[in-house]
């Protein structure tokens, strides 16, 4: 044990583990460098057993058999792989769609939505396998540690948490050295630091490297999901999303289960370069950070949902709901998924969404997704009333002057008072 890799013995929070009591650890395992080093390191430094858990939230192109084999090869007692795509889509992404959830005006919260589910599953598996402690690979600078630890501390007060990356002070080079020394397979070239990636079926983020230089325009190699708009097809494509009570249920008229629908929408968006976001974000731990997001499904579905909701809601609902939506997004971003206020807000959001049924068509073309058609039996819209022509007495244009007189009354009075005093 070197100074650099020693375990943290000072506990700041009640849920942090006392090293002498760590006997069996549930490790949230991705198969990447950090958590692979951790799998070995926990066994060595704590003398503890490790159960690995990998959660499938629809990370594109992941080979879960390979991840499991790697965990077992590194000495895990067992490695469970849970396919949680359905639960993630149903219980986390759909509520976010209904809330038009975009933090900071650009981030559809895919990571923030995934963490409470991952941590909830970690609690379940930890209890079922007799673990006393949950370990994760988050750093001490990000939001993810907050989301995971807040969830564990909320759902399982009897469990403890360790976050080795926060304490072990190994940089990437030391981790690679540690991996080499302990026979941990290191993937790919080790000369270039990779981006820090997190992804699931609702989007993908990249952080690190040049992304930290705010004046550095995105380099092409960061886009591993969405086609760069300049390479997207010259032919536009129209896509129609059908909603029932706020839930996306069909694509171009074909009814689909939610996971398949989201995956197919993502695929279409990727092809047309839709959903690239270069985002500066206020983290809850005080830092500002830049993320490159690729969110093809969210860019299409959220745009369509918001458009349909606007059509079926009154002016008053349309003025009010964005405030509720913003609060919802902030709670979720900030790691407070289990906070009762979110449930309260969901009650209102759900009530509004009862009316959100219909179809929205978007034209996708070289990075843009533009609404071109709308249809809903709940639209608060009457062509006869709105049209330039005669409305057959339903909307009395003769009544308008009276309305304008009363509507502008206070504003006119106040204006005159100010003139008098000048
Ligand atoms: N900035 C986003 C968030 O806080 C994405 C974080 C991605 N996480 C990661 N471990 N790379 O939710």
Image (cartoon, grey):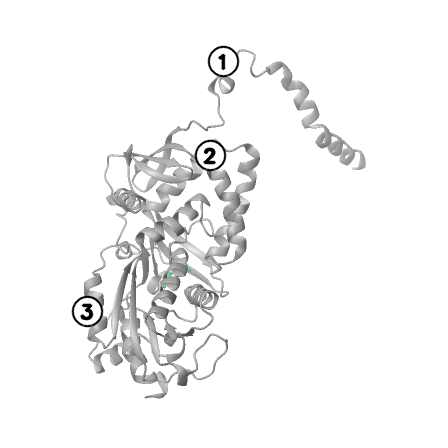
Rendered residue at 39%/70% (across/down): 139
Asked if the residues shown at circle 1 and circle 3 are in contact, with their CB atoms under 8 angstroms apart, the answer is no
Kindly state the secondary structure of the residue where label 2 is placed.
Answer: loop
Q: Position of residue 388 (x, y in %)?
A: 50, 16
The residue beneath circle 2 is: 355
Q: Please tell me in which quadrant of the rendered image residue 209 appears.
A: bottom left
The residue beneath circle 1 is: 389
Q: Which numbered marker is on residue 227? A: none
- Earlier in the chain: of badge 1 and badge 3, it is 3
Q: Residues within 10 Å of mark 2 (few under 14, many from 20)?
A: many
Q: CA distance from mark 1 to mark 3?
A: 70 Å
Q: Quadrant of the N terminus?
A: bottom left
Up-down relation of residue 349 to residue 213 (above or below): above
Rendered residue at 66%/22% (across/down): 403
Q: How many marks?
A: 3
Q: Position of residue 243 (x, y in %)?
A: 38, 36
Up-down relation of residue 388 to residue 69 (above or below): above
Kindly state the secondary structure of the residue where label 3 is placed.
Answer: helix
Q: Is mark 3 within 8 Å of ligand 1?
A: no
Extreme residue toward the right, this view: 421
Q: Quadrant of the C terminus?
A: top right
Rendered residue at 46%/34% (across/down): 355
The residue beneath circle 3 is: 69
- Earlier in the chain: of badge 1 and badge 2, it is 2
User: Which is in the foreground here, disc 1 or disc 2?
Assistant: 2
Q: CA distance from mark 3 to mark 2?
A: 48 Å
């Amino acid at each position: 044990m070197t100074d650099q890799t020693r375990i943290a013995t000072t506990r700041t929070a009640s849920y942090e583990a006392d090293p002498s009591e760590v006997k069996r650890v549930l490790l949230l395992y991705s198969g990447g460098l950090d958590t692979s080093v951790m799998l070995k390191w926990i066994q060595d430094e704590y003398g503890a057993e490790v159960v690995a858990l990998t959660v499938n939230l629809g990370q594109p192109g992941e080979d879960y058999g390979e991840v499991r084999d790697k965990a077992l090869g590194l000495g895990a007692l067992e490695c469970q792989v849970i396919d949680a795509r359905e639960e993630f889509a149903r219980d986390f992404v759909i509520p976010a769609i209904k809330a038009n959830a975009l933090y900071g005006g650009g981030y559809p919260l895919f990571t923030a939505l995934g963490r409470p589910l991952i941590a909830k599953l970690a609690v379940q598996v930890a209890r079922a396998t007799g673990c006393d402690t949950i370990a994760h690979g988050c750093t001490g600078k990000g939001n993810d540690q907050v989301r995971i630890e807040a969830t564990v501390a909320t759902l399982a007060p009897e469990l403890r948490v360790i976050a080795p990356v926060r304490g072990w002070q190994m940089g990437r080079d030391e981790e690679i050295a540690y991996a080499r020394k302990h026979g941990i397979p290191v993937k790919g070239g080790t000369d270039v630091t990779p981006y820090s990636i997190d992804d699931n079926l609702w989007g993908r983020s990249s952080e690190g490297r040049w992304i930290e230089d705010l004046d550095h325009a995105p380099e092409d190699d960061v886009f591993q999901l969405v086609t760069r708009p300049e390479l997207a097809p010259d032919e536009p494509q129209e896509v129609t999303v059908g909603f029932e009570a706020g839930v996306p249920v069909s694509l171009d008229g074909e009814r689909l289960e939610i996971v398949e629908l989201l995956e197919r929408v993502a695929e279409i968006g990727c092809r047309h370069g839709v959903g690239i976001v270069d985002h500066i974000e206020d983290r809850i731990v005080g830092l500002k950070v830049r993320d490159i997001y690729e969110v093809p499904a969210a860019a299409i579905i959220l745009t369509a949902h918001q458009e349909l909701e606007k059509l079926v809601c009154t002016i008053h609902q349309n003025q009010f709901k964005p405030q509720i939506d913003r609060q919802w997004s902030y709670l979720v971003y900030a790691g407070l998924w289990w906070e009762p206020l979110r449930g309260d807000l969901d009650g209102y959001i759900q009530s509004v969404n009862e009316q959100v049924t219909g179809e929205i068509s978007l034209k996708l073309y070289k990075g843009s997704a533009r609404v071109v058609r709308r249809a809903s039996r709940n639209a608060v819209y009457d062509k006869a009333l709105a049209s330039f022509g005669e409305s057959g007495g339903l909307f009395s244009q003769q009544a308008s002057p009276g309305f304008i007189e009363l509507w502008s009354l206070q504003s006119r009075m106040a204006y005159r008072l100010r003139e008098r005093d000048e």
